[in-house]
C-alpha cells in the first residue's frame, strides 16, 4: 500500500513538471496581439485575430545576410536564406500560423519600436496547380509600430514580392490592392534580446 502511495506521488510530481515546463519556455517571448482587417479582395472589411510571438530578434549579421542574398540572387536567394531562420510565429485567425523567419526591430518615435516581420507564406494548392500570378509573391511582410507602452498599429502584406533598390533599400510590392491593417496592437511579455 505504501509503494502505491509513493508511485501516485511521483506521478503527480511528474505531471506538475510537465505542466510547468511550457511556462518556463515562454518567459523569454514577446507576444503582440491585435486585430487583422482586410482592406481589399474577396475578404475586404473582414476582421480576424492577429498574433505574433517573438522568440528572438534577428541579429544584424543575419539582416546583412538577407540583404546580400537579395542583392546577389534576388527574391529566390532571399527565400533560401530566410528558410534557415526562425524568430517566432505569426498567426492570422485561430489557425496554427506560420514560422516568422525574421523579426527586425528598430527604434521609432519617442521610445517606441518599429518591428518588421518577414515570413514564407504557404502557397495554396490552387495557386500551384493553375500557375497563378500570386506564386510570384511568396513572402509575407508585416510592419508594426509600437509606442513605449507597447500599444500601436501596423500593416500586413500577406503576399509580397521583395526587390532591392539602391543597394540597401527594400521595395515591397503587394499582390493585393491595399495592405491589410493591424489595429489595437498590444505587446505582452518580457523579451530580452540576446
Image (tube, rainbow, N blue to C red):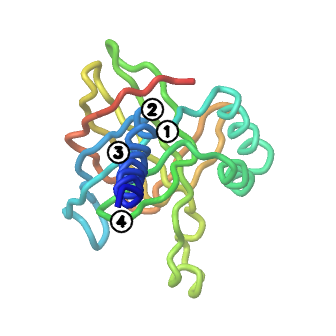
The mark that comes first in sequence, 1 or 3, is 1
Residue at the spot 38% in from the left edge and 61% down from the top edge: 4
Does 12 sit above or below residue 129?
above
The answer to the question of whether label 1 and label 4 lie on touching residues, with beta carbons closer than 8 A, is no
The mark that comes first in sequence, 4 or 2, is 2
Disc number placed over residue 55 in the picture, else none: 1
Give the mark toward the camera: 1 or 3: 1
The mark that comes first in sequence, 2 or 1, is 2
Q: Quadrant of residue 145?
A: top left
Q: Which residue is mark 4?
A: 95
Q: Which residue is mark 3?
A: 155
Q: Residues within 10 Å of mark 3 (few under 14, many from 20)?
A: some
Q: Looking at the figure, which quarter contains the N terminus?
A: bottom left
Secondary structure found at label 1: loop
Does 177 sit above or below residue 117?
below
Disc number placed over residue 125 in the picture, else none: none
Secondary structure found at label 4: loop
Secondary structure found at label 2: helix
Residue at the spot 33% in from the left edge and 32% down from the top edge: 189
The answer to the question of whether label 2 and label 1 lie on touching residues, with beta carbons closer than 8 A, is yes
Judge left or right: residue 92 versus residue 65.
left
Relative image position of residue 188 (x, y in whole percent)? 29, 33
Residue at the spot 53% in from the left edge and 34% down from the top edge: 56
Q: Looking at the figure, which quarter contains the C terminus?
A: top right
Relative image position of residue 168 (x, y in whole percent)? 66, 31
Relative image position of residue 5 (x, y in whole percent)? 34, 56
Cα distance, mark 1 to mark 4?
Answer: 19 Å
Cα distance, mark 4 to mark 2?
Answer: 23 Å
Disc number placed over residue 28 in the picture, else none: 2
Q: Residue furthest bottom?
A: 129
Give the mark toward the camera: 2 or 3: 2
Amino acid at each position: 500500500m505504501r509503494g502505491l502511495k509513493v508511485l501516485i506521488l511521483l506521478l503527480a510530481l511528474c505531471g506538475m513538471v510537465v505542466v510547468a515546463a511550457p511556462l518556463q519556455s515562454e518567459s523569454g517571448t514577446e507576444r503582440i496581439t491585435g486585430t487583422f482587417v482586410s482592406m481589399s479582395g474577396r475578404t475586404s472589411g473582414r476582421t480576424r485575430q492577429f498574433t505574433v510571438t517573438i522568440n528572438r530578434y534577428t541579429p544584424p549579421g543575419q539582416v546583412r545576410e538577407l540583404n546580400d542574398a537579395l542583392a546577389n540572387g534576388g527574391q529566390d536567394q532571399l527565400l533560401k536564406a530566410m528558410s534557415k531562420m526562425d524568430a517566432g510565429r505569426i498567426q492570422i485567425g485561430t489557425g496554427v500560423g506560420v514560422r516568422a523567419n525574421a523579426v527586425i526591430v528598430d527604434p521609432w518615435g519617442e521610445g517606441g519600436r518599429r518591428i518588421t516581420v518577414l515570413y514564407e507564406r504557404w502557397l495554396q494548392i490552387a495557386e500551384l496547380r493553375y500557375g497563378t500570378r500570386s506564386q510570384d509573391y511568396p513572402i509575407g511582410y508585416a510592419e508594426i509600430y509600437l509606442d513605449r507602452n507597447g500599444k500601436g498599429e501596423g500593416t500586413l502584406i500577406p503576399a509580397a514580392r521583395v526587390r532591392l533598390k539602391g543597394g540597401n533599400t527594400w521595395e515591397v510590392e503587394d499582390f493585393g490592392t491595399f495592405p491589410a491593417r493591424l489595429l489595437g496592437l498590444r505587446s505582452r511579455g518580457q523579451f530580452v534580446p540576446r
